[in-house]
């Protein structure tokens, strides 16, 4: 798949009729990503992060994601519903011989 910021990968409807858009990240997602991660941290969801993030940290994170995707070293997909990020999923290519194929 050729990387294109914000490219829509899939659209589908929930049982209640709301539309969910699966898309690639894009510049400008920082504030939405910040709201998403900080809401998870606030709910004490079992994730690796435990301290609320700042906008500057999210800008750095998004830059890392976009850079990795442009290099073909990672793939991240954002799910959005009603203009809010409801999930983000990603995978990253390993850096050594044993996991480079992953």
Image (cartoon, helix red, strand yellow):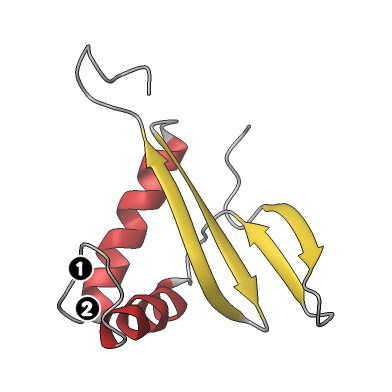
Give the residue drawn at x 22%, y 78%: 53
Secondary structure type for disc 1: loop
Quadrant in the picture for the C terminus = top left
Quadrant in the picture for the N terminus = top right
Secondary structure type for disc 2: loop
**Residue beneath label 1, please?**
49
Q: Is residue 1 above or below residue 22?
A: above
Mark carried by residue 53: 2
**Quadrant hosting residue 86:** bottom right
The answer to whether marks 1 and 2 mark residues whose Cβ atoms lie closer than 8 Å is: yes
Give the residue drawn at x 16%, y 74%: 50
Give the residue drawn at x 34%, y 79%: 40
Q: Is residue 57 above or below residue 6?
A: below
Percent coordinates x, y for residue 6 in the rendering: 61, 58
Disc 1 crowd rating (10 Å Cα; few below 14, some 14-19, many 20+) is few
Disc 2 crowd rating (10 Å Cα; few below 14, some 14-19, many 20+) is some
Give the residue drawn at x 78%, y 80%: 18
In this rendering, would 5 be left or right of 102?
A: right
In this rendering, would 96 be left or right of 26?
A: left
């Amino acid at each position: 798949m050729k990387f294109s910021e914000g490219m829509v990968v899939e659209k589908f409807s929930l049982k209640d009729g709301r539309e969910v858009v699966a898309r690639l990240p894009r510049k400008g997602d920082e504030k939405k990503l910040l709201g998403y991660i900080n809401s998870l941290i606030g709910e004490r969801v079992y994730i690796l992060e435990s301290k609320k993030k700042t906008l500057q940290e999210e800008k750095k994170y998004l830059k890392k994601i976009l850079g990795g995707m442009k290099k073909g070293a990672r793939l991240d997909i954002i799910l959005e519903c009603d203009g809010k990020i409801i999930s983000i999923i990603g995978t990253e290519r390993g850096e050594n011989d044993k996991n480079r194929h992953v």
